[in-house]
Amino acid sequence: MYVDRRSPLYGSRLVLMVHDELISELLADDAQRLHDAAERKAYLMREAMKETTPDLAPAIEAEPALSRIMSKDVATVRDSSGRLLVWESPTKRAA
């Protein structure tokens, strides 16, 4: 996030850790960068959990999601090719 300029996470910052969730602000300069950053963060979370709790390795999941707001309702949204999309609140979509 802070050192490797080649990382998709470079320039982002961790703002909140709650139980098994990490909330970060990502640079939103393009959709591919958002996708890459979210996938990288999910990968790092899975690898860290496998290292600290190897007995749980087969069950470890970390599904990334993108959102412009913080909400417990945020869900993973992907297009037909599997690329992450930004989740939108159902109330916002109805407006």
Image (cartoon, helix red, strand yellow):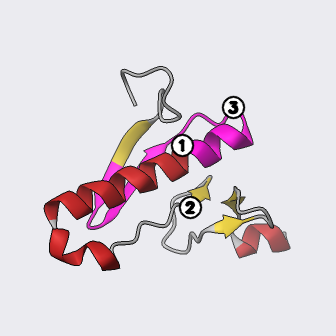
- Tell me where residue 87 appears, x and y as whole percent: 67, 63
Amino acid residing under circle 3 = Asp
Marks 2 and 3 in Cβ contact (< 8 Å)? no
- Tell me where residue 34 appears, x and y as whole percent: 62, 43
Residue highlighted by disc 1: 37
- Tell me where residue 4 appears, x and y as whole percent: 41, 22
Secondary element type, mark 2: loop
Above or below, 7 relative to 31 = above
Marks 1 and 2 in Cβ contact (< 8 Å)? no
Residue 29, disc: 3
Amino acid residing under circle 2 = Ala
Residue 65, disc: 2
Residue 89, disc: none
Secondary element type, mark 3: loop
In-front residue for pair 11/50:
50
Above or below, 89 relative to 35 = below
Q: Earlier in the sequence, mark 1 or mark 3?
A: 3
Q: Left or right of 44: which side holds 95?
A: right
Q: Residues within 10 Å of mark 1 (few under 14, many from 20)?
A: many
Q: Nearer the viewer, mark 1 or mark 3?
A: 1
